Image: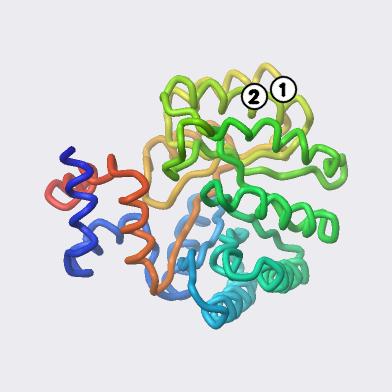
Amino acid sequence: MFNKFISAILPYFPKKFIWIFSRSYISGETIDDAMRVSKDLNSKNIKVTLDVLGEFIKTPDEAETNKKEYLDLIDVSYKTGIDGNFSVKPTSFGLLIDKNICYQHLREIVVKAASYKGFIRIDMEDSPCTDMEIELFRKLKVEFPANVGLVVQAYLKRTLNDIKGLADLNSETNPLSFRLCKGIYVEPEAISFKKYEEINQHYLEDLEFLFQNKIHVGIATHDKPLVEKVYNLIKEYNVPKHLYEFQMLYGVTPKLRESIVNEGHTMRVYVPFGEKWFGYSTRRLKENPKMASHIIKAIFYKG
């Protein structure tokens, strides 16, 4: 109850107050902020994936603005020499307004990334978007087999079947690439697993299928016990390093992140930035009220 109460009232606090928490998890408001953080992570042998905040837009003009910001971001990133790729949320480009316009915006972004031999990761959002985002991915993957990947969420009961349904796109020269995460959106129990042990079990089942079928995977988790089990699977299937990497959010579990890097595994950190950080932060709170207690601790005890 406390967490839900705090998460409900925090969006009404001054932005400066929310920033006390958010600055640990968001690189800043500008491309320069994202470049600064990315350079620092690269210096520690950590790759990045950059994300411009601003999902669930309401107008086509916002979609156009977001596209232009990504096109600029891609140019600046490669000219700066950043070792990284880019994550996109389709609702930032009008998926819920006009999916064809969304596709055209995303295609332009992928074309730009491909001109640098770069890579775009399509984020998975809440369940009303799932089918449309898989459709977008399939269409772009056929045209740009080396330049686009997809996020899948282990807590959705459909996920393993979704992965299997895309397996026809896998090839030795251009393997499918998924980021496998647990999932953060609040979904009905009819379509999602709720218990910690249950989610982890299905996470490992999904991962095992990916390893067995030589599909590239970004192992996105901050769960130390789960990481230990992932290590065992990597050894069991003797997975080559070019077919997996670990992924984490900026500012989250840095000690675990460091230990994974020290073990010799590739690490990529998700680096969000943008002027719309306030909406991103408050939405994350509504989606996951348990974060509220961590915010209070971070504010008063510096994490």
Q: Position of residue 150 (x, y in %)?
A: 66, 49
Q: Residue at point 34% right, 44% down?
A: 288
Mark 2 crowd level (few <14, some 14–19, many ≥20, 10 Å Cα) = some
Colour convention of the picture: rainbow
Q: Position of residue 177 (x, y in %)?
A: 71, 45
Query: Which amino acid is tagged 1?
Result: Asn
Q: Secondary structure at mark 2?
A: helix
Q: Residue at point 39% right, 71% down?
A: 276
Q: Quadrant of residue 13?
A: bottom left
Is 53 drawn above or below residue 242 in the view shown?
A: below
Q: Does residue 188 show up?
A: yes
Q: Residue at point 36% right, 52% down?
A: 284
Q: Secondary structure at mark 1?
A: loop
In this view, the residue farthest toward the left is 300
Is 163 drawn above or below residue 251 in the view shown?
A: above
Residue 100 left/right relative to 59: right
Contact check, label 2 and label 1, Cβ < 8 Å:
yes
For disc 1, the marked residue is 238
For disc 2, the marked residue is 234
- What label does residue 84 carry, if any? none
Position of the C terminus, as image quadrant, is top left
Q: Position of residue 260 (x, y in %)?
A: 50, 34
